[in-house]
């Protein structure tokens, strides 16, 4: 549908006040309404995916202790270049309690 090239149908362009937009106001509004609806649908899908992606698993006491032992062993190896002994690991565990 052809419309006259006036500010009634075409809004002024922000960068240059003497020029008009290439899309009419009605077409631009219809496009933006559809774009926003599509964007909201994409965000809802992302929100549902993220909800399940970042659930926190509750660890048992044994699993927590195993993870701590692995962390201590890693840090000790990085610092001293050799594995930590069981005796040293028990001493560290005794300090925490």
Image (spheres, rainbow, N blue to C red):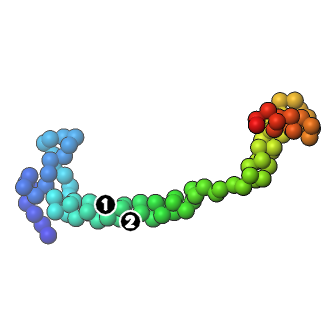
* Residue 27 as seen in the image, left or right of residue 41: left
Report the residue at 86% width, 34% height from top.
91
**Which of the numbered marks, if any, corresponds to residue 36?**
1
Residue 11 picture location, percent across and down: 14, 51
The answer to which of marks 1 and 2 sits earlier in the sequence is 1
Residue 78 in view in this figure: no
Residue 12 picture location, percent across and down: 14, 47
Numbered label tally: 2
Where is mark 2, residue-wise?
A: 41
Residue 45 picture location, percent across and down: 45, 65
Report the residue at 20% width, 43% height from top.
14
Residue 91 in view in this figure: yes
Residue 40 picture location, percent across and down: 36, 62
Give me the C-alpha separation between circle 1 and circle 2. Answer: 9 Å
The quadrant in which residue 27 appears is bottom left
Task: Identify the element where label 1 is drawn.
Answer: helix
22 above or below 3?
above
73 above or below 11?
above
Task: Identify the element where label 2 is drawn.
Answer: helix
Image quadrant containing the C terminus: top right
Report the residue at 26% width, 60% height from top.
32
* Residue 64 as seen in the image, left or right of residue 38: right
Q: Residue furthest bottom?
A: 1
């Amino acid at each position: 549908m052809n419309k006259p090239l006036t500010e009634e149908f075409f809004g002024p362009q922000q960068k240059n006040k003497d020029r008009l937009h290439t899309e009419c106001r009605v077409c631009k509004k219809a496009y933006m309404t559809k774009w926003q609806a599509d964007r909201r649908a994409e965000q809802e899908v992302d929100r549902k995916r993220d909800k399940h992606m970042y659930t926190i698993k509750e660890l048992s006491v044994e699993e927590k202790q195993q993870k701590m032992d692995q962390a201590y062993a890693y840090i000790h190896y990085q610092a001293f270049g050799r594995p930590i002994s069981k005796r040293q690991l028990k001493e560290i565990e005794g300090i925490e309690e």
